[in-house]
Image (cartoon, rainbow, N blue to C red):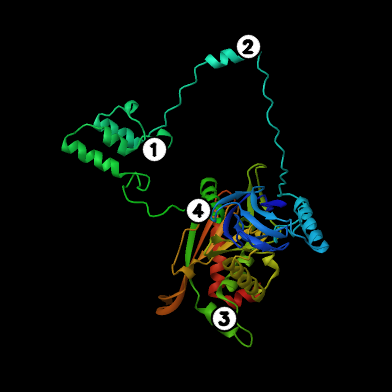
Amino acid sequence: MSEEVFTLPDLGEGLTEATLLQWLVKVGDVVAVDAPVAEVETAKASVEVPSPFEGRITQLHGDEGANLQVGQPLITVDVSSPVGEADSADADRYVEEERAGSGNVLIGYGTGNGPGRRRRTAKKREPAPQPSAPADAGPRASTAAPAPPRRPVQSPIVRKLARERGVDLTTVAGTGRGGLITRRDVEAAGRPVEPSVLSAASHAARVDADTDGRTGLPIHARVPLTGLRKAVADTLSRSRSEIPEATTWVDVDATELLELRRTLGHPEPAPGILAMVARFVVAGLTRFPELNSRVDTERQEITHFDGINLGLAAQTDRGLMVPAVRNAHRLGMRGLDTEIRRLTTAARDGTVQPDELTTSSFTLNNYGVLGVDGSAAIINHPEVAILGMGRIIRRPWVVGDDVVPRSILQLSLAFDHRVCDGGTAGGFLRFVADAIESPVFALAEL
């Protein structure tokens, strides 16, 4: 029997850990070279990990839902069964590619050892040399008294219960793991108490690991903060802690935009409303480049970009993702529509590529699909602004001297006050709003 251990390969993009979503094989299965064995989720995307070996699986390392580090064992394969020369060559090639950083290891994670990629080389640990003992160390060692074992630290609940019942914890033999004293141990060793004290002690006894200490409510579930959810939490927390943001908003009459979309539906399908607004957003960013920039705190400067990668906030089953339309400034309305549909579908299907999730320079958030009118969105760090659009609903609107029903939506812009003041933010927001209200005129000017 000849076994090979396949470790979690370098995931690229500076990623060093992944969550094991599900096993695609089980112990005893025979796998071929490049056959997927597990699906893992990183902070960027979920991917299938292929096997570099052919043979029978003898061990799966880790449970579904566990966090794995790069270089940690993933599967063990018995490769003692005969394989053809071609299969053997494929296995050797795969292992060599993994070592060299080939993109064939995990599709979509780039190749080579360029910037953003970290290579880990397994270092063989040698046992630490033991100092040689003096010749007369034996007798002294035999007479030395062993250090007394440390008592396990008891929980605050147990200590409180012990005080209320007058129990000296140093006299109680714990029945928990490693001698840990439990509530039951304290109750068994306790003395009779007054009813009021007993009631308080009973209440304390009910508060355990499955009860929230502040509210006293039972805990229904604990959800690990890992993978994409952890990445989202880190980004949004950093945004709120680092960016001095301000928010401004405006109600917009989108009636003519809806009418234009109806006229564009022949003979080709009409572009979506999001794509139409995206075209105006791109045009607005060319006029107000401060909102398409970065704050470089190390160099103490604001970096303006020559081009626009338009991020699209997409709600998925895995959490919030922001895939980016690369070079959006080079696309027309229909080109934007095609890319928006492709990226949002890929994000929801879990097939979006990692580099498509990390390259946006400005984000457009259509929270109207969630059935809400407005939102003070959090800027997608390290960007400096995010534009949100609410749902389009019929409302009474003053046109001339008449009150008539119109299709109204709300736009909200959150911006980094370090890069610009309210005049710039208001100018950009008003530009997009005017384009939505008079889209034909705006398109003629673009």
Q: Which of marks 2 and 3 is nearer the N terminus?
A: 2
Residue type beneath disc 3: Arg
> Are the residues flagged by discs 4 and 2 in contact, CB closer than 8 Å?
no
Q: Image height check: is 22 above or below 444?
A: above
Q: Earlier in the sequence, mark 2 or mark 1?
A: 2
Q: Nearer the viewer, residue 119 or 275?
A: 119
Point out the frontmost of discs 2 and 1.
Answer: 2
Q: Image height check: is 267 above or below 397?
A: below
Mark 4 residue crowding within 10 angstroms, few (<14) / some (14–19) / many (20+) = some
- Residue 421 in view (yes/no): no
Q: Which mark is residue 176?
A: 1
In terms of image quadrants, where is residue 312? bottom right
Q: Which of 259 and 190 is in front in this view?
A: 190
How many dots with numbers? Answer: 4
Instruction: Give the residue pinned by disc 2.
Output: 136
**Quick one: SS at disc 3?**
helix
Point out the frontmost of discs 2 and 3.
Answer: 2
Q: Residue 363 carries which label?
A: none
Instruction: Give the residue pinned by disc 4.
Output: 246
Q: Which of marks 4 and 2 is nearer the N terminus?
A: 2
Drawn side of residue 195 relative to residue 296, left or right: left
Residue type beneath disc 4: Ala
Instruction: Give the residue pinned by disc 3.
Output: 261
Q: Distance between the residues labelled 4 and 3?
A: 32 Å
**Quick one: SS at disc 2?**
loop
Q: Residue 371: x, y in percent?
A: 44, 70
Q: Which of 100 and 430 is in front in this view?
A: 100
Q: Residue 78: x, y in percent?
A: 70, 55
Residue type beneath disc 1: Gly
